[in-house]
Image: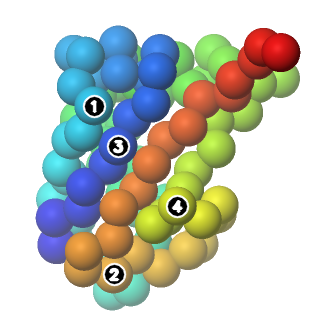
């Protein structure tokens, strides 16, 4: 199954500036964790960036079809995964 992944803001830098990528994943069921792991295999810079943020206490939010999701969330054909970095400002 091919899954669309959208990357917001600074996370784009880790995937050559692209706003959206597609990853091919297999398995039954396909979970968000599987999609993210495949994404990290394809884009190791993204893994390093997310881990670096996490080490500083900053967590990236993962969304499936616009709703917050965890690694066990089942992904269906046509779903869109979004990686949303933390935002600040006032």
Going from the N terminus, do you reach mark 1 or mark 3 first? Answer: 3
The residue shown at (22%, 25%) is 18
| Gap between marks 3 and 4 measured at Cα | 11 Å
Which residue of the protein is positioned furthest toward the front in this rendering?
90
Residue highlighted by disc 4: 66
Q: Check contact, mark 1 vs mark 3: CB within 8 A.
A: yes
| Gap between marks 4 and 1 measured at Cα | 16 Å
Residue highlighted by disc 2: 76
Asked which quadrant contains residue 54, the reply is top right
Going from the N terminus, do you reach mark 2 or mark 3 first? Answer: 3
Label 1, secondary structure: give it. loop
Residue highlighted by disc 3: 6
Q: Dot 3 surroundings within 10 Å: few (below 14), some, or many (20 or more)?
A: some
Q: Is residue 46 left or right of residue 5?
A: right
Q: Check contact, mark 2 vs mark 3: CB within 8 A.
A: no
Front position among marks 2 and 3: 3
Q: Is residue 22 left or right of residue 81?
A: left
Asked which quadrant contains residue 55, the reply is top right
Q: Position of residue 70 (x, y in %)?
A: 64, 63
Front position among marks 2 and 1: 1
In this rendering, the count of numbered labels is 4
Going from the N terminus, do you reach mark 4 or mark 1 first? Answer: 1
- The quadrant of the picture occupied by the C terminus is top right
Q: Position of residue 22 (x, y in %)?
A: 18, 49
Q: Check contact, mark 3 vs mark 4: CB within 8 A.
A: no
Going from the N terminus, do you reach mark 2 or mark 1 first? Answer: 1
34 versus 13 height, above or below:
below
The residue shown at (35%, 43%) is 6
| Gap between marks 2 and 3 measured at Cα | 16 Å
Going from the N terminus, do you reach mark 3 or mark 4 first? Answer: 3
| Gap between marks 2 and 1 measured at Cα | 21 Å
């Amino acid at each position: 199954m091919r899954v669309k992944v959208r990357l917001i803001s600074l996370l784009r830098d880790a995937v050559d500036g692209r706003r959206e990528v597609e990853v091919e994943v297999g398995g039954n069921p396909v979970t968000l964790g599987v999609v993210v792991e495949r994404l990290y295999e394809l884009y190791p810079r993204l893994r390093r960036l997310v881990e670096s943020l996490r080490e500083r206490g900053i967590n990236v939010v993962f969304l499936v079809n616009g709703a917050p999701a965890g690694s066990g969330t089942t992904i269906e054909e046509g779903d869109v995964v979004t990686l949303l970095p933390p935002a600040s400002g006032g």
